[in-house]
Image: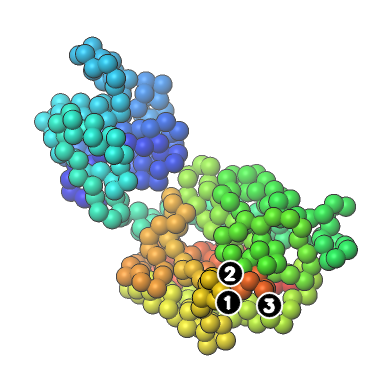
Amino acid sequence: MPSDNLLMIAASARDANMLYAAGMFADDALIYLRLRGRCHLLVSDAELGRARKQAGHCRILSATRIAERLRKEGRKRVTMAHIAAAVLLDRGLRKVAVPEDFSLGFARQLRDAGVKVKPVKGEFFPQRELKSADEVKKVSAALVMAEVGLSEGMQVLKNAKVGRNKRLLWRGLPLTSDRLRAVIDAAVVQAGGVSSRTIVAGGKQGCDPNHLGHGALRANQPILLDICPRSQKTGFHADITRTVVKGRASDGVRKMYRAVEAAQELGLNLVRHGVEGRAVHRAILGSLKKAGFETARRDGHMEGFVHTAGHGVGLDLHEAPHLNANSRDLLRAGQVLTVEPGLYYPDIGGVRLEDVALVTRNGAKNLTKSEKVLEL
């Protein structure tokens, strides 16, 4: 954490740093100040009671009262930046550190009020990377929500019938990506989570790693299922991906699946304290290449292993550390991350497997329990 006095203005329901600092959800913007090592949280009068209960580690101040004072002093338009500036100036402080994505408008208003703003380079709260035992439990709880959704989705595919043109039918109606996604998302909600852009991509749609999927699902084609819920209670995320085939997979898909499965196992074996993120990515890339799957640009698009090997998971779905070709992030005990190799070809589709693991000094502890099976 920077030693400077700190300022954030954000809604904790949408800003992970604010949620981390405040410890409470709020849809409206809060003002967080760390002044001379002590946390201050400014909220509206309507939120005072809840803030005192849920953010007891901070000194709770009324933003409403400060705004009223500023209006009495003659300021016609009072913003959150003006309120923050008033608190700082009252304490004789004229310089504050803010996140790199701090609002330009707020920065100008602070400057006009006589407060200098200095953006913090890199992570605002770098300690977020290292999860406490309680935070690991919260990620694991979110992961259970993902696995509940995955299990429901798999059950639907197992029970689906094969109709004309190999189209899947479920409960007498065509089984589409949207219909299966709705089943998965509903199960996640019932488990206490909120899904974010669940991927159900069948056949050639899976060649785009981020294609949500649409239309009819068919037998004997790979179906990529990627579920990344956020816990409604804690705000922590999880991420899981499986690739399945209803029916019989082609020899090509089987070969892709075996290569991805072996690459993921290699990646998980490499994850440990002190290893560079890029070393894991490059090892996975090399494993897939050795299995016969090159990564290259063809006809204007990339095919093969086209994304990173993984990413940190916590209050943000994608956070440090990063497992990519150029990452110099050093893995440290206490980080939670994904390992997710994949292969993508436009004439086949995609195959990806993704688990969440805890970095320890002795290796990776896989937190994911869901089995890996290609054919249903």
Residue type at mark 3: give it: Val
Residue 371, given in percent of the width and then of the height, sits at: 64, 68
Residue 369 at least partly seen: no
- In front: mark 2 or mark 3? 3
Residue 158, given in percent of the width and then of the height, sits at: 78, 63
Q: Are marks 1 and 3 in contact (CB under 8 Å)?
A: no
Residue drawn where x is 26% and y is 20% of the image: 66
Which residue was labeled with disc 1?
260
| Label 3 SS | helix
Which residue was labeled with disc 2?
353
Which residue was labeled with disc 3?
253
Q: Are marks 1 and 2 in contact (CB under 8 Å)?
A: yes
Residue type at mark 1: give it: Val
Residue type at mark 2: give it: Leu
Residue 178 at least partly seen: yes
- CA distance for labels 1 and 3: 10 Å
Q: Earlier in the sequence, mark 1 or mark 3?
A: 3
Residue furthest out toward the top:
72
Q: Nearer the viewer, residue 23 or 342?
A: 342
- CA distance for labels 1 and 2: 7 Å
| Label 2 SS | loop
Q: Earlier in the sequence, mark 2 or mark 3?
A: 3
Q: Earlier in the sequence, mark 1 or mark 2?
A: 1
